Image (cartoon, rainbow, N blue to C red):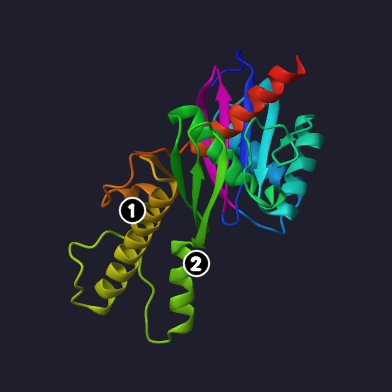
Amino acid sequence: MGGAAQMILAVDIGNTTIQLGVIAGNQIQDRWRLQTNRLKLSDEYAVQIFELFRLNNVVVSGFEAVVVSSVVPSAGREFTAMCRRYLEIDPVVVSPDLDLGIDLRVDQPEEIGADRITTAIAAFSEYGGPLIVVDFGTATTFDAVAEDGAYLGGVIVPGIQISMNALFDQAALLSRVDLSMPPQVIGTTTKSCIQSGFYFGFLCQMEGIIDRIKTELNTEVKVIATGGLSSLIADSSVKIDVVDPDLMIKGLYTIFRRIQKKNR
């Protein structure tokens, strides 16, 4: 990747993973995922990320801005310090305090996670409203967006992976299994029973919550899925209209463009 075009670094710091995207010419040019480590310091982030830049021929001096969404305060602080010291850029950090161009029609907007705001902005910008965003992360979140783009609230449930970990940690005789789509609901081994339970259990949970949100909204809505396991679950569901794994990066870029336009 050359250094001709100005580049934006979009960073989503989640509880389990950090997603990074390099955007140039309005296109996502590179994307990477790292494990979130609450104990990692800014210098350590610099070593790790600059090595990714080197391996992918990303010219560091070509970055115009960095946009960060973080739900892990310690990691967010260290990443911000890394940007200031090594990239010489003061990053834009997403929060409800920023003028993000979205009406937060909830009782306590300051409590909404930056990740949920960002994906709602991206989904509305990309697909229009009304819609539901389902994000399969450490927690699985369902966020409702009105026809005019307002954020209406949503649902938070334990994520698939942490639910599986809880079962295996508490049940001494159950061996860990990978999540995959079973060929049938009725398992014939302990392993296939566990896989079926988690896969179809979360599938039915997702579809049930989507149906209830649609009933409360009392209108037809699009359903956009994102997050690490979105494609796997969406394969068996007729409720999901679009799977967009880059929704967070798109949202961060949309936020940057809005702020850039306001500052001109």
Compared with 84, 194 (above or below) is below
Compared with 177, 16 (above or below) is above
User: For the residue marked with disc 2, what is the amino acid?
Assistant: Ile
Q: Secondary structure at mark 2?
A: helix
Residue span colored magenta: 17-35
Residue under label 1: 233
Residue at point 66%, 52% (across, down): 107
Q: Report whether 59 appears left or right of 211.
A: right
Q: Report whether 243 appears left or right of 187.
A: right
What is the x, y in percent for residue 140? Answer: 48, 56
What is the x, y in percent for residue 104? Answer: 63, 41
Circle nearer the N terminus (1, 2) = 2
User: For the residue marked with disc 1, what is the amino acid?
Assistant: Ile
Please check the rendered image and state whether residue 33 is part of the magenta-colored stretch, yes or no. Answer: yes
Residue at point 30%, 60% (across, down): 180
Residue under label 2: 162
Number of other residues with Cα within 10 Å of mark 1, as a class: few under 14, some 14 to 19, many 20 or more: some
- The answer to which image quadrant residue 115 occupies is top right
Please check the rendered image and state whether residue 116 is part of the magenta-colored stretch, yes or no. Answer: no
Single out the residue that lies furthest toward the front. Answer: 218
What is the x, y in percent for residue 184? Answer: 18, 65
Q: Are marks 1 and 2 in contact (CB under 8 Å)?
A: no
What is the x, y in percent for residue 51? Answer: 62, 38
